[in-house]
Image (cartoon, rainbow, N blue to C red):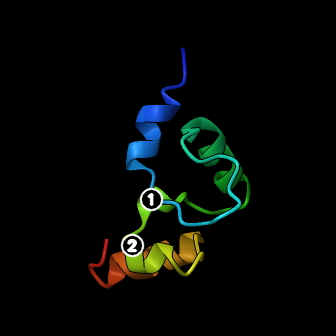
Amino acid sequence: MECNQDQNLERCNCTYPDCSRKGLCCECIQHHLKARQLPACCFPPEAEATYDRSFEHFARLVGQNQV
């Protein structure tokens, strides 16, 4: 399968300036899951901007009906 990085970048909401995985969803997901995190695309903009991508942060947002 070929990566559609250009198309993925149109939807990528990652604001981390030095991210080398922008638009490379497979690499991004692997990186974050290994660190017990979710990628930026799972979070609303305000939560993504905190760079707290933890499962726990996501669970809190779900509990608050923010996701």
Tag 1 secondary structure? loop
Residue at x 54%, y 57% (from the top left corner): 39
Residue 34 shown left or right of residue 43 in the figure: right
Q: Is residue 2 above or below residue 46?
A: above
Question: Hey, which quadrant is residue 65 in on the image?
Answer: bottom left
Residue 12 shown left or right of residue 37 in the figure: left
Q: Is residue 60 above or below residue 48?
A: below
Would you name the residue on which mark 2 appears?
Answer: 45
Q: Position of residue 16 (x, y in %)?
A: 62, 66
The type of residue carrying mark 2 is Pro
Quarter of the picture containing the C terminus is bottom left
- Residue at far left of view: 65
The residue lying toward the viewer, choosing from 46 and 33, is 46
Would you name the residue on which mark 1 appears?
Answer: 13
Nearest to N terminus: mark 1 or mark 2: 1
Q: Is residue 16 above or below residue 52?
A: above
Tag 2 secondary structure? helix
Q: Are marks 1 and 2 in contact (CB under 8 Å)?
A: yes
Q: Position of residue 8 (x, y in %)?
A: 44, 39
Residue 2 shown left or right of residue 43 in the figure: right
| Mark pair 1, 2: CA separation | 8 Å
